[in-house]
Amino acid sequence: MKGSDILINNIREQASRSLRNVDRKFLELTLDNSCSQAELDNILREWDIDNTPIRTNLLIALLMKSRQDLVFPAAVTPRLNGVLSYCRFKEIQTRASISTISNSLKEKNIPFLLAGDMAMRGYFPDYQRWIGGLDILVPASEYDLALETLSSMVKDKQVNLHKAWDNSVMRKANGQLPCPEDLVFLALVDVYETIIRKGSLKNNLNLIVDINKLAEKSGGLDHGIIWENACSAGVEFQVLFAEAVVGSVLHGVLPDNLPESSLSEKQLEKKYVDFLFKRDVIYGAGEAVSAVRKTIISALTAGSNAGIIPSVLKKYIWTLQILQHQ
């Protein structure tokens, strides 16, 4: 096995670990609309509504709403209905601000697209979702002016403002919505960023559901567009890693292999080490020391097998020494 193959396998293994077993079961349950009562009962034994992110609770609530033949425990049925009601309320709140944002940007002649949850709602108006804020996509050349125009709303976290990675984003749009491939690209980057900061995807399982729905609606995604976006934005590794996460649950929706001539083995190696460093050290919280120690061992082992230059791991050892003396 070549060193690059070992490296890719290590990346895929780390990606697969980013989904906890219980989260994987939640996804399999919600993605399979033909699940049985026994499968539902099995997952509900591991489910605690009070300690589960609202986006995941909403997936369960939507399953309850769509599958009238399934029996949910009497104690949780009203609470799941409450989740549906609360999500409707939050969406009404968010929609009320769209006209204000639209008028403000149009006054300055700033083109924009709706992204994130509201864009998904645009493509799937009958599919209820949690909408905690508005994701707005603007051309990079207009970003500073848009930020100034919406400064108070951005500060209050009513709006998340994003730069378009290239000029084609606006041309490919369907009205005020990015094309499906662009939304999938954004979702993949979000998958990666969530794992970096949270260690797993438990807070954003809906991203995988979104990717699946967009793939089904478009009758198959044009991965060339997704990869062009990744190259234009300089996030090839992020997309590669996120696709490995998604591919461990959704089979055949995204390609298994990295496109040729995209990243050299050395570039891939460096970005992989950077990922481990950020996940285990910068966002590693109280378990950072033990996490870094395990990462050093596994990375050194992988490095030895793949012929990776050990010097790329020096910052791990340096950080571990600092953490041990705190």
Image (cartoon, helix red, strand yellow):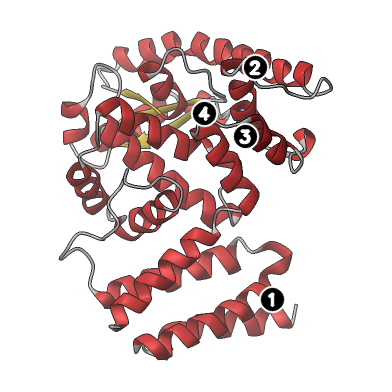
Q: Of the residues shown, which amino acid type is indicated by label 4? A: Ser
- The residue at the far right in this view is 75
Q: Give the residue number, with chain letter if any, for mark 2.
A: 84
Q: Give the residue number, with chain letter if any, for mark 3.
A: 56
Dot 3 crowding, Cα within 10 Å, few <14, some 14–19, many 20+: many
**Which residue is depicted at the point 60% across and 60% down?**
283
Q: Of the residues shown, which amino acid type is indicated by label 3? A: Thr
**Which residue is depicted at the point 27% across and 55% down?**
234
Dot 2 crowding, Cα within 10 Å, few <14, some 14–19, many 20+: many
Query: Percent from the top left, x then y, of residue 139?
Result: 25, 33
Name the secondary structure under disc 1: helix
Q: Of the residues shown, which amino acid type is indicated by label 1? A: Ser
In the foreground, 264 or 168: 264
Q: CA distance from mark 3 to mark 2?
A: 12 Å
Q: Give the residue number, with chain letter if any, for mark 1.
A: 290
> The C terminus appears in which quarter of the rendering?
bottom right
Query: Percent from the top left, x then y, of residue 53?
Result: 67, 37
Mark 3 or mark 1: whose residue is earlier in sequence: 3
Q: Give the residue number, with chain letter if any, for mark 4.
A: 34
